[in-house]
Image (spheres, grey):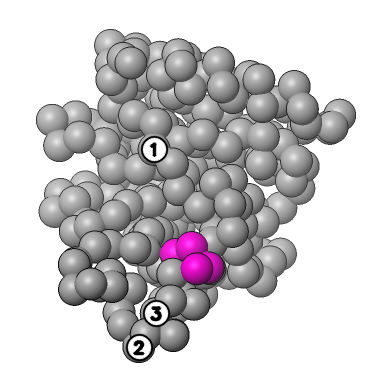
Amino acid sequence: MSETAWGPRRHTMNDYTPNPDPSGIDVPLSVWPIWSQQHLIECLVKQFTTEGDLVALLGLAGVNAIVESDRDGVIVCDPETALREEEALRHVAQSRSTAIIMAVNAMTAFNRIEAIRESALTICAPAPARYIRAWEVAAATVRPFGLLAVIWKGPFPPDAAASCEEAGLSYVGHIVAAEAGEFDRAAATAESLETASHGRSRRAHINISLWARYPEQSGGGL
């Protein structure tokens, strides 16, 4: 599989309270149970966007969840993921929304992403550290009052916070997601989501950091 700045990663989730005004963001630490592979994308879309908005996925599968929510979607991913996404869209009921799937490699990914503008919500996973322009390029896709949602496991990439701020974004919240079964097991055994049974450490949860672009931060050519 060809590597891109945002390689395909799989994540998931459930409970949300739709917010009709994404510009009025007030997101404390929230915990969302996960139900399925696509549910994380679906819930982020329904929480932070409205019908007709543009949602971008960078290196993550799930464009069908965007279209089914009556939003327009664009995904930048490797060719193998693109084929799977095209197949998934064939099973989506007819919708007024559109979907653009861009198959890229490490040489073409940034050029394609730079063509994306006015995204109400851009969802991505951290790019490898050697892609030093990754955060700048991802942030540039976000419109005023739009969001960049970064999905990650383990320690947050050390350069991400400073890079997002330099790109004109402000940190606004953090969501923790985990499979519903993990919450059940944690409640039953009184153990942390960070600790597996039998004493072995693991990270059973997923983190989502939210970064917003406000109008006064829209300068700098982004």
| Cα distance in 3D space between marks 2 and 1 | 30 Å
Judging by the rendered image, the residue that carries numbered circle 2 is 190
Q: Are marks 2 and 3 in contact (CB under 8 Å)?
A: yes
Q: Secondary structure at mark 2?
A: loop
Height in image: 11 above or below 20?
A: above
- The residue furthest bottom is 190
Label 3 Cα crowd, 10 Å radius (few <14 / some 14-19 / many 20+) = some
Q: Secondary structure at mark 1?
A: loop
| Cα distance in 3D space between marks 3 and 1 | 25 Å
Q: Nearer the viewer, residue 131 or 86?
A: 86
- Of mark 2 and mark 1, the one earlier in the sequence is 1
Q: Is residue 148 visible?
A: yes
* Residue at 57% over, 37% down: 62
Q: Which is in the foreground here, disc 3 or disc 1? A: 3
Q: Amino acid at mark 3?
A: Ala
Which range of residues does the magenta coloring cover?
Answer: 177-181
Task: Indicate whether residue 173 is drawn in magenta.
Answer: no
Judging by the rendered image, the residue that carries numbered circle 3 is 186
User: Where does residue 215 sit, x and y in percent of width and height?
Assistant: 47, 54
Q: Amino acid at mark 1?
A: Arg
Q: Most prominent secondary structure in the magenta stretch? A: strand
Q: Amino acid at mark 2?
A: Ala
Label 1 Cα crowd, 10 Å radius (few <14 / some 14-19 / many 20+) = some
Height in image: 42 above or below 110?
A: below
The total of numbered circles placed on residues is 3
User: Where does residue 93 sit, x and y in percent of width and height?
Assistant: 84, 32
